[in-house]
Image (cartoon, rainbow, N blue to C red):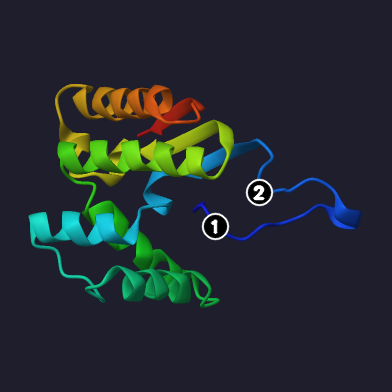
Amino acid sequence: MNAANDEYLMPRGGASITALPKVSLHDHLDGGLRPQTIIELAAEIGHDLPETDAASLGSWFAEKSDSGSLVEYLKTFDITTAVMQTHAGLVRVAREFVEDLAADGVIYGEVRWRLSSTSLAGSVSTRPSKRCNKALRKASTSSEAPVTRSALVSS
């Protein structure tokens, strides 16, 4: 989900859908990264991207996501998971994810992520999971519109 400037109204002149509180269920952490964040995190780890500016990268993601091909669609996750391989990257993505939920008017978000999709999965402790959950919790309480969230971590 990304905050949009468009105003969507209920039929027959009803309330603004944009302004209504929302619930986001089964929302994958690796499926909603900001293009600029991807660019910055990729530069930190030396990961090549198909586009180097945020608008073009966002268009690339939209094209792959709407291509009608599962293979092409899954290529997007090769990139998003690649930039989530460090603790700092994972924490930043988690924080921005909750900020974006709040900007979209979400009051309850069920955030999912798979520890096994990161190199952090081999960690001998639960630190990656704890750091991600801590980032989600901190962002949930510090955003302008607090988001109640639950984090579902699978291996």
The picture places residue 153, in percent across and down from the top left corner, at: 39, 31
User: What residue is disc 1 on?
Assistant: 4
The picture places residue 106, in percent across and down from the top left corner, at: 57, 37
Q: Would residue 36 be found to the left or right of residue 144 on screen?
A: left
User: In what element is the residue under mark 1?
Assistant: loop
Q: Would residue 41 be found to the left or right of residue 116 on screen?
A: left
User: Relative to residue 129, is residue 113 depicted above or below?
Assistant: below
Q: Quadrant of the C terminus?
A: top left
User: Relative to residue 14, is residue 73 depicted above or below?
Assistant: below
The picture places residue 151, in percent across and down from the top left corner, at: 44, 28
* Relative depth, front residue between 39 and 110: 39
* Relative depth, front residue between 137 and 14: 14
Q: Residues within 10 Å of mark 2 (few under 14, many from 20)?
A: some
Q: Splitting the image into 4 quarters, where does residue 120 fall?
A: top left
User: What residue is disc 2 on?
Assistant: 18
Tags 2 and 1 touching, CB below 8 Å: yes
Q: Identity of the amino acid at label 2?
A: Thr
* Relative depth, front residue between 47 and 146: 146
- Gap between marks 2 and 1, in whole Å? 8 Å
User: Residue at position x 45%, y 37% from top?
Assistant: 112
Q: Splitting the image into 4 quarters, where does residue 71 fall?
A: bottom left
User: Residue at position x 74%, y 48% from top?
Assistant: 16
* Relative depth, front residue between 18 and 64: 18
User: In what element is the residue under mark 2?
Assistant: loop
User: Relative to residue 130, is residue 78 depicted above or below?
Assistant: below
